[in-house]
Amino acid sequence: MPQAQGAMRSVWDGVYTSAQADKGKALFGDNCAKCHGGTLDGNDEIPALKGSHFMADWESQTAAELINRVHTTMPMDDPGKLSTPSATSVVAYLLQQNGIPAGNSELTDLTASQARIDAQKPGS
């Protein structure tokens, strides 16, 4: 039986590009900041999108699962407004803002499904 292409890896392995995160920052500003805040710190009952609590919430899930959450449930007042590619760019920005380093390849549907979110850099 053939194995699935590509092995699971950590987001710490550089799964998005800086340019992709820059695109995500603009999309975040236009679609997400009104609730989550421009600094991603959340407000009232709106959760923060950076920091140890956010990373712990997504621990061991894949980047694809986070992209799907953004795509299907956000923004709260217009779920699904962001296309999957736009949601992917927003997730690249969220990873960047959580101290996850950029790499040389863009985050895509395939690589996102193989990118595990680790709150801490493996081996650190």
Image (cartoon, rainbow, N blue to C red):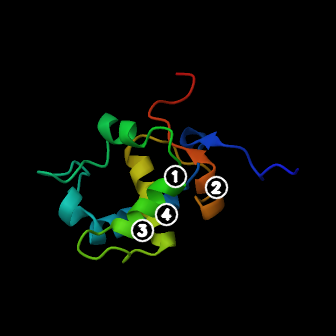
Reading the chain from its start, which is encountered first: label 1 or label 2?
1
Residue at position x 51%, y 30% from top? 121
Q: Disc count in the image?
A: 4
Looking at the rendered structure, the secondary structure element under dot 4 is: helix
Crowd tier of the residue under label 4, counting other residues whose Cα lies within 10 Å: few below 14, some 14–19, many 20 or above: many
Looking at the rendered structure, the secondary structure element under dot 2 is: helix
Q: Residue furthest top?
A: 124
Q: Nearer the viewer, residue 53 or 104?
A: 53
Reading the chain from its start, which is encountered first: label 1 or label 4?
1
- Residue 74 location (% of width, % of height): 32, 67
Query: Closer to us: mark 3 or mark 4?
Result: 3
Q: Which mark is residue 88?
A: 4
Residue 73 in view here: yes
Q: Which mark is residue 71?
A: 3
Circles 1 and 4: CB distance less than 8 Å?
no
- Residue wearing tag 1: 63
Quadrant of the rendered structure where residue 57 is? Answer: top left
Residue at position x 28%, y 72% from top? 30
Q: Residue furthest front?
A: 1
Residue at position x 45%, y 71% from top? 86
Query: Closer to us: mark 1 or mark 4?
Result: 1
Q: How far apart are the two marked residues, 2 and 4, measured between alpha carbons?
A: 11 Å
Q: Is residue 80 left or right of residue 76?
A: right
Q: Amino acid at mark 2?
A: Thr
Reading the chain from its start, which is encountered first: label 3 or label 4?
3
- Residue wearing tag 2: 111
Query: Closer to us: mark 2 or mark 3?
Result: 3
Residue at position x 11%, y 51% from top? 44
